[in-house]
Amino acid sequence: MISPAEADALIGQQFTCLPIESLPLVQCTGSVLRENVYAERDQPPYDRVAMDGIALNTEGLRTGHHSLHIQAMQAAGDPPMQLVSSDHAIKIMTGAVLPTGCDAVVPIEQITIHDGLATVKDSACVTSGQNIHRRGSDTTQGALLLSSGMLLGAPEIAVAAGAGMARIRVSAQPTILVVSTGNELIEPGDPIEAYQVRRSNTYGIVASLRRRGFQRIADDHLPDDFGVLRRRLRVHLDTHDVLILSGGVSMGQLDLVPRALAELGVRQVFHKIAQRPGKPIWFGVGSTGTAVFALPGNPVSTLVCLARYVIPGLYAAMGESARVPEKIAIAAPIDVKVTMTSFVPVRVQGDEWGRLWAHPCPTNGSGDFTSLAGTDGFIELPPGPNTFAKGFVTRLCRW
């Protein structure tokens, strides 16, 4: 069996990079940027007023003019006015361009206005340049703002909009098919017998994918029938970029998935990773480049393998720059008896000092998915046997 790190490398080598498409900016949240974005102009593009109040020339205050004639009002979006003299002031709004001839803004709280005069309070300390966000102080025209390979969240979308980008080039979303297998699985809401179980894995997989912004998702359920399995998988391989299967990959008589995939020309890259849970995971690539992840059917194993291998693989195929794994300290000792990597569900909580800790939430086996409720993800512990003390820092994968 290979190690998790070796599996990461093999997935990265085999996954086909997805094509690039140009989309309206409003459709790009959760996508991976595939071009650089540069500043359209200086930011701010002008000397920007940072407070509601009055704009004035401090020379007037220095020469004793503490009550200034209100010349006019200038709002954000108005062209800049010209101050007529240092014994005048212009009422100004946050975000407006600084009027010509002014060098400071006094906040509304530090003035009184009566009969067209704005009087600066004695307690106010007014200096040249105060409450002015100078042109180009954030960034200058032509500066690199966003690099190709960045995952686009709310801040990045705002930056692209501020750079005047109505459309941007991003990786196409993969078309994903989630497949559950097994005669024992019954859809939620349908009548169920005592010897059957609910079809829950597919719902967990789809929820995880959608939470991360993947939208082109379909699902199917296939029985433990080799002919049906082979026929339906052939169609799915021809019509999707990624297949995520749950179940049918272990060593039982009805674990038919690896044989069906082999007969359909899907090349096995690896089968089994030295880890617990999720050891039987299978990964391969179809003749047209379709990536196939066949995950173990036990619910905990399914969700662990999805978060640890499938989702990072999808982001890599979309051209995302390599992520630095999140690290966290464990909040209690953990005994690892197996000689393979262990994944332990955890709840992430902060202490009174604001430090985050991973509190172990062990399950009652890889079928005990109810224990995952309220957890944030899982930690990755090196092969044992070993006891990892409180404070041991290791990788955290979030659901």
Image: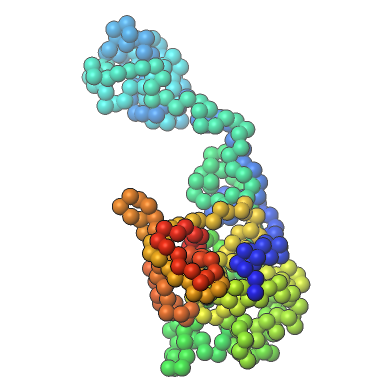
Query: Which residue sits at x=52%, y=89%?
Result: 184
User: Which sits in the foreground, 120 or 317?
Assistant: 317
Return the x and y of residue 312 as percentages of the image width and height.
59, 61
Query: Which residue sits at x=29%, y=26%?
Result: 108
Query: Which residue sits at x=38%, y=64%?
Result: 332
User: Image height check: is 228 above or below 375?
Assistant: below
What number of labels is visible? 0
Return the x and y of residue 18 as percentages of the image width and height.
68, 60
User: Which sits in the foreground, 74 or 229?
Assistant: 229
* Quadrant showing the N terminus: bottom right
Q: Is residue 150 left or right of residue 90?
A: right
Query: Which residue sits at x=55%, y=90%?
Result: 183
Q: Is residue 124 visible?
A: yes
Q: Is residue 200 left or right of residue 31?
A: left
Q: Is residue 205 visible?
A: no
Identify the image quadrant of residue 249.
Answer: bottom right
Return the x and y of residue 137 as percentages of the image width and height.
50, 28
Identify the image quadrant of residue 83.
Answer: top left
